[in-house]
Image (cartoon, rainbow, N blue to C red):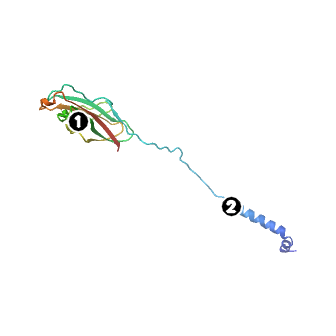
Amino acid sequence: MSRIQALARHPKRTLGVLAAVLVAVGIAIGSGAQFTAQSANPNNVFSAGALSIDNSKEGAAILTASGMTPGQTVNGTVDIANSGTVAGTFSLSRTNLVDTPPTPALSTQLNVVVSDCGEFVGTTPPTCGDGDDTNVYTGTLAAMNASFGLGSYAPDEQHRFDFAVTLAAGTGDQFQGGESSATFQWNAVSA
């Protein structure tokens, strides 16, 4: 008896063997033996920088003068630093101007000069009035109604500013007893 005759004589056994062979081939093809590899870079961390202003006279006046006479000048200094972790573009503005009495306004007679004396070198402050100062503002306290750019400060960069306020030499009697107050505001935006 030939092999074909033997297979034809036992068809169930033939179908069982054929099914087993097909399952084995399917498993071998489906397993797809192949090489694999992986690589990972874990613990990637992202954080936002911070922009912060350090003001040596935070919450206090830079200068105060009472009983000024025409031609008298009063000076005050303040140190401003970028205490953040990112560079910032700094500016200065005058806010909250109050004249008492409102007319005549003493602020129109107060001549203000704001100078950037320069950058600290380590912990050593710059010298104001040495000829290297940069003029930030010159005009009356009343006219100081804009924002004045101070430039870009790197993290930990610190500058000293000098404020000189002079009661105009020609200030008349109508200003006697007048008073002006204002807030000097430091602003920064990330560069």
Q: How many marks?
A: 2
* Discs 1, 2 touching: Cβ within 8 Å: no
Amino acid type at image mark 2: Gly
**Which residue is tagged 2?**
30
Nearer to us: label 1 or label 2 = 1
Query: Which of 62/94 is in front?
Result: 94
Q: Residues within 10 Å of mark 1 (few under 14, many from 20)?
A: many
Rendered image quadrant of residue 88: top left
Q: Residue at x 28, y 38 (%)?
A: 92
Disc 2, SS = helix
- The x and y percentages for residue 89 are 32, 42
In the picture, measured across the screen, residue 118 lies left or right of residue 45, that is left
Rendered image quadrant of residue 134: top left
Disc 1, SS = strand
Q: Quadrant of the C terminus?
A: top left
Q: Which residue occupies the extreme top position in the image?
A: 67
Q: Residues within 10 Å of mark 2 (few under 14, many from 20)?
A: few
**Which residue is tagged 1?**
114
Query: Which of 100/127 is in front?
Result: 100
Rendered image quadrant of residue 151: top left
Q: Which mark is residue 85?
A: none
Q: Residue at x 18, y 36 (%)?
A: 108
- The x and y percentages for residue 140 are 19, 37
In the picture, measured across the screen, residue 21 lies left or right of residue 86, that is right
Amino acid type at image mark 1: Val
Q: Quadrant of the N terminus?
A: bottom right
Give the spatial CA distance, label 1 vs label 2.
Answer: 81 Å
Comes first in the chain, label 1 or label 2: 2
In the picture, measured across the screen, residue 145 lies left or right of residue 23, that is left
